[in-house]
Image (tube, helix red, strand yellow):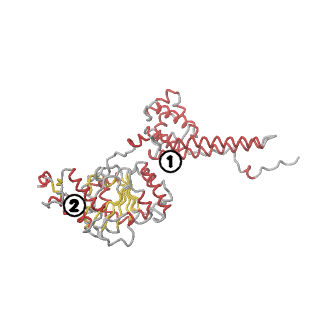
Amino acid sequence: MDDPLPNPPHLAAMDMTAVPPYDADAEAAVLGACMHGADVIDAVRNLLDGPDFYRPAHETVWRTILSLRSEDLPTDPIVLGNRLQEQGDLNRVGGKVYIHQLYGATPSVDGALHYAGIVRQKADLRRLLASGIRTVQRSMEPGADPDAIRSEVESEVRAERERALASGQGRLSRYITDGWRFITETGADKEPLWGTREQTAWASGESLMIVGAPGVGKTTLAHQLIFARLGLTDSVLDMPVAPGKRVLYLAMDRPKQIAHALARRIGPEHESRMRDGLAVWQGPLPATLDKEPDLLADLAAAHQADTIVIDSLKDAMSTLVDDALAVAYNNARQRAIRNGVEVMELHHQRKGSEGTPRAQRPSLDRVYGSTWLTSGAGTVLFVSGEAGDLAVTIHQVKCSTGEIGPLQVIHDHERGTSQVDPALDPAEMLRKRPDGLTVRELAVIQSGDNNPDRAATEKARRILDRLVKNGLAAKAEGAAGGNGGGQQARYRTSVRHIGAVS
């Protein structure tokens, strides 16, 4: 009898007894994360089905968690263990000890979706492996019909595509909301992070970009905002700052110099908050944000940060002038914001624009790089001045809601603080001028131009009208003249403001 023919190489390489792909640690981590809160379950359930868990015990725990969630009950180890015991499943899953082990198995609750993605990937590989093995077995049966096998394979492929589409729709549905909820519940009416509703320097859910030449105090200003987000102070430039929980500082540009600048305001009494509330990444990122759009959100989740500071933008991207890469970076920015992370970016102006008079209003085209960088930002503040200047001007060249400035600011480089120049504060100017100011006179002072344009004039008008609204000034309408002429309205400090100051 002839020796049997050997298996072809592609069949010989298949080990039918090999352990299918799975990740027990990822399964344990996602189950443990889901025990911490209903919102985690709601996010993960759109990604996973029961059979996606390789270990039968994990599938049982998962189905029980979903059952408790459907009844709006807690899913902590105590309630979960009690429900498993009632079902007669507690011992089969490893007992109460194992349930508590699962609870502590997750490195980060915020990473639940990433762990679930690993579980789902392994489950997809197992399905592909099982389908391949079935196809091999059917093709080796006596009298196998190739057309029938091909038809069965195509049916399985269609079924898997439909399942993936349904799962994908479930995953994406968490980003879809109806119009009313979008308007009323997505934060459009939140108080600003920095400033007031009337004067907003940094809106919640929108990035803040601080632009300027090297040495004009961008980092000094950013550090003051960080301290305020950590609750170490309550305002910056006389505008309130909402406190946060934890800041992740991406110190990519000269970390030692950044550390030295931070140290100017830090004392022993701040040690505890700085340890708990500030995480610092030193040096280059593992990948640029235009190449890895999920990296920014992942970093925030890994460090449980609700605020990220990018210092500076040029170190976070492959290049700043490519429109496609700028759009990719904006995707990274918006994904982080969508996850509830507030973003602040430090950036540079175009070369050749240094030396512009600090009172002259800059524009967005003086920001270096692709226009899509500023298009995706919420607020853009432009710091005008020369390197090392103690006095600079901050212009808001893009605002979301509530315009500020221009602010004439004085830096104290030794202490790392900044303040609005009292001599150039409109309210203080009115107080020191018994005859008051007209809109045009304020526009001349703020723009540095004896013939201010319409934009500068309207900005001055809004500032003076805001002072009237806040009770800090009074408006006296000018007398009408012939041929459409007449005197301009004058704004004077209010009696209340005089009394308050004196």
Residue 140 vs residue 265: left or right? right
| Residue shown at 36% from the left, 65% from the top | 256
Q: Secondary structure at mark 1?
A: helix
Query: Badge 2: few (under 14), some or many (20 or more) residues near its Cα, within 10 Å?
Result: few
Which is closer to the viewer, label 1 or label 2? 2
* Residue type at the position of mark 2: Asn
Give whichever of 475, 74 is nearer the camera.
475
The residue at which mark 1 appears reads as 114
* Residue type at the position of mark 1: His
Extreme front residue here?
Answer: 483
Give whichever of 57, 300 is nearer the camera.
300
Quarter of the image that includes the C terminus:
bottom left
Mark count: 2
For marks 1 and 2 on the same chain, the one whose residue lies earlier in the sequence: 1
Q: Is residue 101 visible?
A: no
Residue 323 against residue 74 in the figure, above or below: below
Residue 371 vs residue 88: left or right? left
Rendering coords of residue 289 (x, y %): 47, 59
Extreme right residue here?
Answer: 1
Rendering coords of residue 462 (x, y %): 26, 55
Rendering coords of residue 353 (x, y %): 36, 71
Give whichever of 220, 89 is nearer the camera.
220
The residue at which mark 2 appears reads as 483
